[in-house]
Image: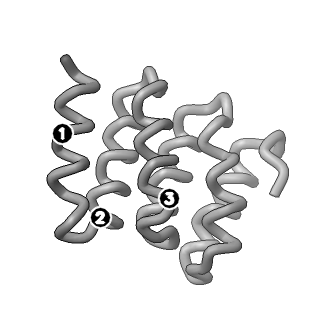
Amino acid sequence: MKTEAEPEVLNVALKSLEHYPSAEVAAQVIAILENEEPAIRSQAARLLGLVADTTQLKILFDAYQKEPEPVVRSALVNAMGRLAGPGDMLYLTECLRDSEA
């Protein structure tokens, strides 16, 4: 999926991908976390919370650490929380605590 598409087109495409959870969709959406539009990055993070799996937690956390926009950071935290299993929660809590210090 190209990330230079018009924001409106990209937003509609991301919303439609919610119905097709798969590793392939998640892999394509990860690149969109680099989009210049915060609304698109936020939508991509939300979608990843629905279609990704725990193997993408580190990618989401890395995106969180470099993300300047609060709305996108919030979407990334939400996505990580949706994906994390019971064994990941302590790790995520520590990571988030360290990144805010």
| Residue depicted at 65% across the width and 36% down the height | 34
Above or below residue 64? Residue 47 is below
Residue tagged by mark 3? Answer: 56
1 or 3: tag closer to the N-terminus:
3
Figure check: 89 above or below 25 = above
Residue in view at x 35 percent, y 66 percent: 83
Q: Which residue is mark 1?
A: 94
User: Do the CB atoms of the residues marked 1 and 3 lie less than 8 Å apart?
Assistant: no
The label on residue 84 is: 2
Image: 5 above or below 14: above
- The tag earlier along the polypeptide, 3 or 2, is 3
Q: CA distance from mark 1 to mark 3?
A: 17 Å
Q: Nearer the viewer, residue 58 or 42?
A: 58
Numbered disc 2: secondary structure: loop
45 sits to left or right of 7 = left
Kind of residue indicated by mark 1: Glu
* Camera-nearest residue between 26 and 2: 26
The residue located at (71%, 53%) in the rendering is 10
